[in-house]
Amino acid sequence: LVGFCLANRLSHHIDLTDAERAALNGLEADQVHVRRGTSLIAEGERSTGPYIVHEGWLRSSVLLGNGGRQIVRISLPGELIGLSALAYPDAAETICALTDAVVCPIDRRQFGALFDDHPRLAALLFAITAGEDTALAERLASVGRTPARARIAHLLCDLVARARALDPEADALQMPLTQEEIGDVTGLTAVHVNRMLRGLADDGMIARRGNVIRLLSEARLIEEAHCIAARRLVTDWLPRAG
Amino acid sequence: LVGFCLANRLSHHIDLTDAERAALNGLEADQVHVRRGTSLIAEGERSTGPYIVHEGWLRSSVLLGNGGRQIVRISLPGELIGLSALAYPDAAETICALTDAVVCPIDRRQFGALFDDHPRLAALLFAITAGEDTALAERLASVGRTPARARIAHLLCDLVARARALDPEADALQMPLTQEEIGDVTGLTAVHVNRMLRGLADDGMIARRGNVIRLLSEARLIEEAHCIAARRLVTDWLPRAG
DNA sequence: CGACCCCTTGATTAGCCTCAACAACCGTGG
DNA sequence: CCACGGTTGTTGAGGCTAATCAAGGGGTCG
């Protein structure tokens, strides 16, 4: 078994019991490898359940009738993706690997069984989902109400913060998104993304070398992005384990 | 007890057992009245849990550092709001009543107990939350990747569809949002919202009389908005009741 | 009656998009 | 090994969408 599993991630928030750990191991048994650039599932296809990311980065996007594309989420190891499979029979989003990746498919029913067997885990997943919902709302605010530079600053801050949560050592961001994809996240064109990145570099806020982006002044970026700092989850309301 | 409770809404998706119904009644016992224009909770304030809307419409918004405001959700009776209270100790969004409203506050711990006592209800709420997450992603796509007219068409289609789910008779939309608020949903200025509404009216797609908006050609609006039709929830994965 | 909010409309500006051309890089196949 | 096509990044010029600034009208509430 390779990669960073959900059990790892959940144990950052609560102390897992042996039974809970075993249940998660059972849930995360299957692993599917996805090569960079290939899609795990396409919008409209029949889906059987969500996935847990074990390794690599992925993106979820929706297509517009006018040919446009919006990337609605970038997913890192330890995160759940494709949750719309719990609401609808067909996938609402196309999920595509940004790097070579390993994911674990979860059948809806397996997921449902978790509510019976391990209510505390189910509740924690609910809390995590609520937190990601807040992050999505924040991105909507960024796209809807801030200028281009700020949107890109916001994305960069978001990604480094999440990458750092996985690897506290990393001070530079190995950026797997093309400028066109950055545009699809932020609602801009690739051309304009390019100009804004150049602007940020000229102003000494970031340094670029190939795909690697280093944040030279995270404070100024955060200020420019009107970021909201990552918050710690409250877990005091979860039911008792067992 | 007034209004449209959560039990009503959930029973559209599954047949509730008596025990489940009783549990929901217990959950929804408290009712708080909120007058139009007043806020239930402000961003940053300590929060104790989410709310269930029993009557009226409310909006959730976030403030940007630059003075901007983004409305991230419009909530109708039967819906859960303020779910970020399950993730963070302080409210992530300001919730404000668009009409006189009645809501039921739910303490985090009450909500947590639901996972122990009624796993099927907890799982259904998870599914509903996943569905709303999809709707939020769709709005992000609308704001990020479609022109002003399309964004407004999208909002109108969304609101009438949801209003109609509550009252199938209603063919007109009693719009409680000011044009400035419509702008805060769609990422536009009030002035431009006004011009776009006029344009839609001039083209015979909507008719306006005061606050009441009638959709004259919903098909054309949907096409213009690149809307995705409301889908039916899958519930086959939920654990058994009891 | 006056103050305030909301709607409406016009004129001007600015931010971002479109179109276009080229350089750099990559994986592929000859 | 190199030639090649395709993708990505870069930069310039010009146009369009939506923001800004400004002014006035209608409604409601104190």
Image (tube, coloured by chain):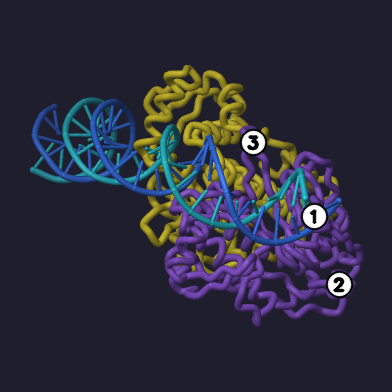
Chain colours: A yellow, B purple, C cyan, D blue
Element type where label 1 sits in the image: loop
- The chain identifier of the residue carrying mark 2 reads B
Residue at 46% across / 59% down in the picture? B150
Residues behind callouts 2 and 3 on a single chain:
yes
| Whole-percent x, y for residue A208 in the image | 42, 23
In this image, B169 relative to A116: left or right?
A: left
Residue where numbered disc 1 is placed: B50
Element type where label 3 sits in the image: loop
- The chain identifier of the residue carrying mark 1 reads B
The residue mark sitting in front, 2 or 3, is: 3
Q: Earlier in the sequence, mark 1 or mark 2?
A: 2
Q: Quadrant of residue B126?
A: bottom right
Task: Using the rendered image of the protein, determine whether residue A28 is visible from the camera's viewpoint.
Answer: no
Residue at 76% across / 56% down in the picture? B97
Viewer-nearest residue: B190 or A80: B190
Residue where numbered disc 2 is placed: B2
Other-residue count near label 2 (Cα within 10 Å), few / some / many at <14 / 14–19 / ≥20? few
The residue mark sitting in front, 1 or 2, is: 2
Separation of disc 2 and disc 3 at Cα?
37 Å
The residue mark sitting in front, 3 or 1, is: 3
Amino acid bearing label 2: Val
Quarter containing the C terminus of chain B: bottom right
| Whole-percent x, y for residue C30 in the image | 8, 43
